[in-house]
Image (tube, rainbow, N blue to C red):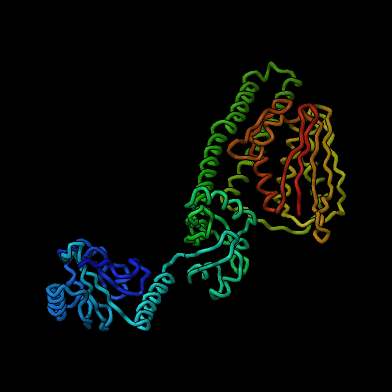
């Protein structure tokens, strides 16, 4: 007698638990649904165990006797038995029916066991499984999601909802994922890459519910149907804002360390060269006067003394800048703005540089009235103006002109205040375009000699930039070789 397999779908979606053996009683097939009933999984049984090992010891003998008795009688099926699984999760009894399988010759070839359990029991077991599964998903400290290609949310776990500061899955599912991106076009561009790559990993900025910007890392997979059409995106998402801040802090620290090393190198360069050279010339000139004072005429002595005076002034300016720069690097210069007359301050500085300008017959004029009252740090502003005006004298030929003027920048927003811009313009030798970018950087700052071979270190403009920025302003230069320069800075 020959029997086909019973009319039951041999797949994991069947609502019955079944097993199939060969003629040696070894299990050949078992569905993964058994994991909802017991702690056994299919891979522990298939091609490994005797079918009776599925059941508790109390039931094994009875089951085997029923099977052997039915085979002896060439029966088709055993009577129903109430059994329990070995390592069963819950203490329920199940109804077991074993169908005997024969080949074409009527010889025994295996067993087909079907275990029935009620729909209520199945729902309870599956419900517990889903509950545990849901708890597991929500306890994972990563956001887990499933979304459609147009941005609709199909699923979001608790962590994902918390990352974006929403209250519940219901509230979160009302949003469109596209609206979370700070760069509105980011997702649509990224999807084109994701679809081709199937798996994706990106870092981007996103909005929380309160429009706070956070950094997130997104890793996922593109799920497609059998025709290659995108069904949805499954992925995990992590808030990496703290890591980004730490990375930014590290980069800032590295940059500051680099700047400190550059500053240290610059400092020693000035000490070893720029400061030493003027004193060497000063010593040589004074020694020459001492050795040949009886031979020199009055005009020759006056010329040498004038040279010594220029060297002394240059050395003093160098020391002044060096000390100011050193104090600023150590944070010893405090920003203390107060109301002051800009016109009066400029006139004081022009008077202080009068001898320097007179020696080159250079005219220095200011069009700024004393009635213009501004709010600024007097010491810092004095240093800015003194450096810019003395540089203008240094790089302007004899009988040249220097003008200090003001203008107001009108902001785009009419509610914002006008911005004061101060200009120091000269008729000097000008600056090449490739050198302009180097003027305000400590690592590339350079100095060239003036029209009368005046020396410098480049520190003055570095100080100007630092002090202007402490006022919340900006400094830049407009210049062409042979046409002079105009250094401009703003005071908001």
Residue at 48% in and 60% down: 235
The reply, left or right, for residue 244 in relation to residue 72 is right
Seen from the viewer's position, the closer of residues 172 and 79 is 79
Seen from the viewer's position, the closer of residues 335 and 41 is 41
Seen from the viewer's position, the closer of residues 299 and 106 is 106
| Residue 31 percent location from the top left of the image | 30, 67
Seen from the viewer's position, the closer of residues 146 and 167 is 146
- Does residue 212 sit above or below 432 in this rendering? below
| Residue 378 percent location from the top left of the image | 73, 53
The reply, left or right, for residue 435 in relation to residue 236 is right
Q: Quadrant of residue 452?
A: top right
The reply, left or right, for residue 456 in relation to residue 265 is right
Mark yes or no: residue 247 visible. no
- Does residue 316 sit above or below 14 in this rendering? above
- Does residue 375 sit above or below 359 in this rendering? below
| Residue 466 percent location from the top left of the image | 65, 47
In the rendered view of the protein, which quadrant contains the N terminus?
A: bottom left
Mark yes or no: residue 118 visible. yes
């Amino acid at each position: 007698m020959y029997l086909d397999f019973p009319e039951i779908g041999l797949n994991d979606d069947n609502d019955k638990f079944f097993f199939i053996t060969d003629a040696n009683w070894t299990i050949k097939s078992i569905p993964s649904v058994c994991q909802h009933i017991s702690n056994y999984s299919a891979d522990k049984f298939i091609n490994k165990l005797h079918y009776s090992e599925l059941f508790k010891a109390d039931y094994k003998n009875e089951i085997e006797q029923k099977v052997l008795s039915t085979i002896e009688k060439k029966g088709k099926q055993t009577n129903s038995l109430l059994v329990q699984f070995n390592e069963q999760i819950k203490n329920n009894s199940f109804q077991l029916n074993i169908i005997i399988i024969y080949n074409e010759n009527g010889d025994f070839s295996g067993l087909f066991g079907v275990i029935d359990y009620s729909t209520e029991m199945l729902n309870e077991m599956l419900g517990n499984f889903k509950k545990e599964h849901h708890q597991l998903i929500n306890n994972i400290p990563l956001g887990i999601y499933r979304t459609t290609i147009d941005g609709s949310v199909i699923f979001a776990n608790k962590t994902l909802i918390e990352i974006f500061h929403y209250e519940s899955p219901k509230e979160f599912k009302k949003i469109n994922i596209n609206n979370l991106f700070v760069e509105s076009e980011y997702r649509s561009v990224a999807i084109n890459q994701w679809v081709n790559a199937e798996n994706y990993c990106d870092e981007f900025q996103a909005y929380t519910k309160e429009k706070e910007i956070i950094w997130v890392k997104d890793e996922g997979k593109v799920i497609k149907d059998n025709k290659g059409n995108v069904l949805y995106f499954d992925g995990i998402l992590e808030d990496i804002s703290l890591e980004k801040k730490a990375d930014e802090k590290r980069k800032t620290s590295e940059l500051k360390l680099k700047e400190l090393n550059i500053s240290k190198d610059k400092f020693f360069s000035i000490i070893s060269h720029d400061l030493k050279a003027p004193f060497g010339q000063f010593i040589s000139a004074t020694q020459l006067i001492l050795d040949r004072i009886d031979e020199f005429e009055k005009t020759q002595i006056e010329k040498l003394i004038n040279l010594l005076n220029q060297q002394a002034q240059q050395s003093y300016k160098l020391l002044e800048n060096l000390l100011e720069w050193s104090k600023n690097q150590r944070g010893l210069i405090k920003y203390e703005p107060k109301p002051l007359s800009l016109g009066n301050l400029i006139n004081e500085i022009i008077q202080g540089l009068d001898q320097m300008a007179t020696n080159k017959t250079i005219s220095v004029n200011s069009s700024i009235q004393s009635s213009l009252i501004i709010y600024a740090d007097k010491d810092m502003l004095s240093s800015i103006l003194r450096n810019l005006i003395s540089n203008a004298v240094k790089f302007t030929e004899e009988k040249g002109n220097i003008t200090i003027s003001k203008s107001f920048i009108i902001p785009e927003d009419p509610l914002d205040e006008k911005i004061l811009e101060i200009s120091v313009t000269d008729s000097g030798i000008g600056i090449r375009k490739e050198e302009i970018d180097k003027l305000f950087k400590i690592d590339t700052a350079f100095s060239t000699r003036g029209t009368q071979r005046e020396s410098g270190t480049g520190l003055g403009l570095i100080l100007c930039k630092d002090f202007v920025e402490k006022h919340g302003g900006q400094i830049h230069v407009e210049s062409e070789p042979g046409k002079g320069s105009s250094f401009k800075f703003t005071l908001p």
